[in-house]
Image (tube, rainbow, N blue to C red):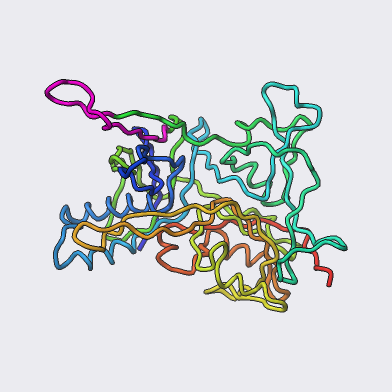
Amino acid sequence: MKDIDMVIAPRDPLLFRDGRPFGQAGVAQTGGLNWPRPGTIAGMLRTFVGYSRDRDYFAAGPQKENHINKIKKVGLGLFLPALKTHKGMEICLPSPTDAVAFLPKNMEHIEKRSLNIKALVPKDLNYGEGTDISWSNWLYPWIEEHEKPQQMPPFWRWNHYREWLINNKLDLPATGILPDDLGPGEPAIDERTHVCIDKESGTAVDSMIFNTSGCSFRHEMQIVAKVRIGDADTPAGLDMALLGGDRRMVHIEWGQDIVTWLQLPEEIGKGIRGLRLVLATPGMFEGGWAPSWLLRSLEEGSWETVPGTEIRLRLRSACIPHFLSSHGWDMGKGKFGAPKPMRKEVKAGAVYFVEVHGDTDPKKAAEILWNSSLCEDKQDALDGFGRILVGNWQQVTETKK
């Protein structure tokens, strides 16, 4: 297997469906997602590679199960939005959930509002406070500001994200930063209404109407991905593929080192005891909101080893947004495949605060964990779930007994 870069440039508005049973009573809307899930990109990738091997690769027959098992080894790594600029491709990342946006002081009257970014910092409870959480080492994300939070841009540019990983703050002027300078918005929503036309009368048929909600990518926004394919698969140059619902067309560019990927900042892990593990892609965990092996470290006195490494750490806090529902189509079931059962994903941008054990070097741990997957299931990792970036956590405190 070898790693190559893939750049996806949508030609048409893309439909990323949310798994609702379209066509049933009361459901006349399809689409609904503003950004693709890992399974969508992995499915497009494997379909493309499968058909490049054999036009009948997925056809029903005695070899179908073997073909499906082989194609599932084609892996998706990190996939992120990127902006085309005059300096090249600028990678962006999902906004971290330990960052909260507020209006700068005395700037509420300005029409084009800028943002001031503050950090959620894990702290122990004060005397007399308590919750029903039984974990003795758990710290609670806290922020001093009491104003109403503002909407955060869904993505951050790498230069701001890098600063946040290192310092857990942004060095901003008193006037704050404009949302477009912090990061781009999601693709614009393209709403379309479809009707059925009677071929004899030339008029619309009663009740035969539905809407689609697609993602219209701006010309400067693309999707970049690191993929792992077999040595015999040699896509190169430019290609066309079908992505999402309604088989919308996208341009694909393949190549070695055509994307400048994010590197671990030198400052991460130096002189600290804590790290922040930030999901760059949605997570799919057996433990629900966190990997099951990491949840075991919540017990008093417990330290857990990251699977496949010698890194020992324990979970101390987390910033987890609402879950995402994951759906898909299983080509291995039946003649034409079958729907996958719904699973819950942890949203990209979620942050886990971990304390590193004394016999583990935080700098070395950060180097090993950077761009790895936290998923317990190897197939989930191959599907692109659970990829993480690593940041500093300077203020590791002990809980009061």
Q: Nearer the viewer, residue 139 or 84?
A: 139
Query: Residue 244 placed where, x, y %?
Result: 34, 44
Residue 27 in the figure: left or right of residue 397: left
Residue 11 in the figure: left or right of residue 366: left
Residue 185 in the figure: left or right of residue 210: right
Query: Residue 203 placed where, x, y %?
Result: 20, 21
* Image-quadrant location for residue 327: bottom left
| Magenta span includes 202 | yes
Q: Nearer the viewer, residue 262 or 169?
A: 169
Q: Nearer the viewer, residue 293 or 391?
A: 293
Q: Residue at x 63, y 42 (%)?
A: 159
Q: Residue furthest left?
A: 200
Write the start and end of the magenta stretch as one range. 195-216
Q: Residue furthest bottom?
A: 301
Residue 296 in the figure: left or right of residue 169: left
* Image-quadrant location for residue 363: bottom right
Q: Is residue 312 above or below residue 140?
A: below
Query: Residue 88 placed where, x, y %?
Result: 50, 36
